[in-house]
Image (cartoon, rainbow, N blue to C red):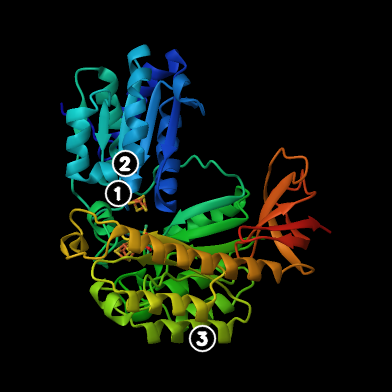
Amino acid sequence: MPAQQDLTDPDGQKAAAERVRRVLSPRAAKARVRTFGCQQNEADSERLRGMLAMMGCSFTEDDGEADVLVINTCAVREHAETKVLGVIGALSHLKKAKPGMIIAVCGCAAQRPEFAEKIRGSYRHVDLLFGTHALRRFPELLEAAVAGTGRVFSAEDSDGEIAEGLPVLRDRKYTAWLPVMYGCDNFCAYCIVPYVRGRERSREPERVLTDAGALIASGAREITLLGQNVNSYGGKPARGAGGASGTGFPELLRRAASLDGDFLLRFMTSHPKDAGDALFRAMASSPKIARCLHLPFQSGSDRVLSLMNRGYTRGRYLELIAEARALMPGLVITSDVIVGFPGETEMDFEETYSLIESVRFDSLFTFIHSPRAGAPSAKLPDPVPRAEKQRWFERMTALQDKISGEKHSAYVGKTLRVLITDETGDAAYPARGRTEGNRLVRLTNGAGAAGEFREVKITDGNKWSLMGTAV
Ligand code: SAM
Ligand code: SF4
Ligand code: F3S
């Protein structure tokens, strides 16, 4: 008689997890997951930890203590990959001293064939490698690695599905990541993400809302809705007006904000080509939605924006900022920018510089273009020397540091609502938290108040953070 299929476990992951648990539990196995890269990877790591807990592991913060060590990698810039290769290389000594441990490498870099080949050939102490698409198959893959019959490599490329129902073990109590969609279809010319994360796919709104409700019930006070471009949530609608499910991102945001409880919603990232009035009105509609917008502009030059395949102009970007500010005075705006895109000239850079001067972002994530094999920009002629790009980069960061410092100084004397997120153990600033605008606040008091929204009087500020006292 054929074995009965467990309909709640169609591809046998729970059964594999149970078999791994029977092996690891008696050994009191400890696991550690180290995460590189963005919030999406952090959210994936919470699922890896959830699956490891299901497989009977407890957790450690010490590589040397780990029986299962998982390195969740990022591929967005070359530096991210070389850094992670350095970390993996340094583990060879540990593996020699403790041959029974399992070293697993996963995530975005692992999805790249070139990286996987490097691990296969030169990092022979790695037992298991799997890409972003194989995340949900972790129990089955770990089972094969634990069996010890050989190294396990899974570089499947089935990018169309969504792994629902994975167990999640969050590492932060009061703040939570909530993925609403996966992948990216935008193919910005410099970016590797669409190749390692696959095609864009949105979760059903009901599932997102159920998860949000469960997070609030479990004590989360700040929930960040995640996607590479949340404004195309729900299909491929123009300006997020609703897609396959009929629910676009603005609607999802409104519905999430109408859930019961004392919490704050954030989201990232928004793409300017799909952001607009509907999004800003939804943000302005509820005090439970943070008045804080991360809207990457990448370049202030129309010529470079077009080479980057970004789908908007400098003028449109500035229009969006003006519309958002008109609806939400005091809105905190942050952004991402790349200098030294292949073919960028000094005149192009000056346009980026002047855009920063005119928008005056609250903070800015600044990058020098890093060619990624597979992304179109890696093939473009790139005549500007690295030293010149570095000079532009430093001018730009000096400008932004000045603006951030001025913006933070302007908070001094004001009283702001702050979510106290954690205790620090530091005598001068025993607690820290975040303002609605996601500014970091170091508090002179507030120990014991983690998880509470408190009114905080701001007493000082520098370019990185604010200092204050809960009143
Ligand atoms: N999906 C988001 C978006 O479009 O804004 C963020 C994607 S990426 C994880 C975060 C940032 O890394 C991008 O906004 C971009 O500024 C930067 N980035 C991506 N690829 C890069 C590259 N090849 N070189 C330098 N910076 C890059
Ligand atoms: Fe990369 Fe562009 Fe997609 Fe963001 S929107 S992940 S920058 S391709
Ligand atoms: Fe994020 Fe890096 Fe992957 S930025 S999506 S972890 S390539």
Of the numbered discs 1 and 3, the one sitting upstream in the chain is 1
Q: Is mark 2 within 8 Å of ligand 1?
A: no
Which residue is tagged 3? 322
> At label 3, which amino acid type do we have?
Ala
- Residue farthest to the right? 471
Task: Tell me which amino acid carries mark 1.
Answer: Glu
Which residue appears at 34% of the width and 83% of the height? 313
Cβ atoms at labels 1 and 3 below 8 Å apart: no
Of tags 3 and 2, the one toward the viewer is 2
The three-letter amino acid code for the residue at tag 2 is: Thr
Q: CA distance from mark 1 to mark 3?
A: 35 Å
x, y percent for residue 239: 37, 80
Indicate which disc, 3 or 2, sits on the residue closer to the N terminus: 2
Residue 415 rendering spot, x and y as whole percentages: 78, 67
Q: Is residue 205 left or right of residue 163?
A: right
| Residue 82 circle label | 2
Q: Position of residue 298 (x, y in %)?
A: 37, 70
- In front of the other: 14 or 357: 357
Q: How many marks?
A: 3
Asked if residue 402 lies left or right of residue 453, the reply is: left
Kindly report which numbered mark, 1 or 3, lies closer to the viewer in this rendering.
1
Q: Is residue 244 visible?
A: yes
Q: Residue at x 32, y 52 (%)?
A: 77
Residue 156 picture location, percent across and down: 18, 43
User: Disc 1 to disc 2, how far (Cα)?
Assistant: 6 Å
Q: Residue 449 versus residue 136: which sits nearer the camera?
A: 449
Cα–Cα span, label 3 and label 2:
40 Å
Disc 1: which residue: 78
| Quadrant for the C terminus in the image | bottom right
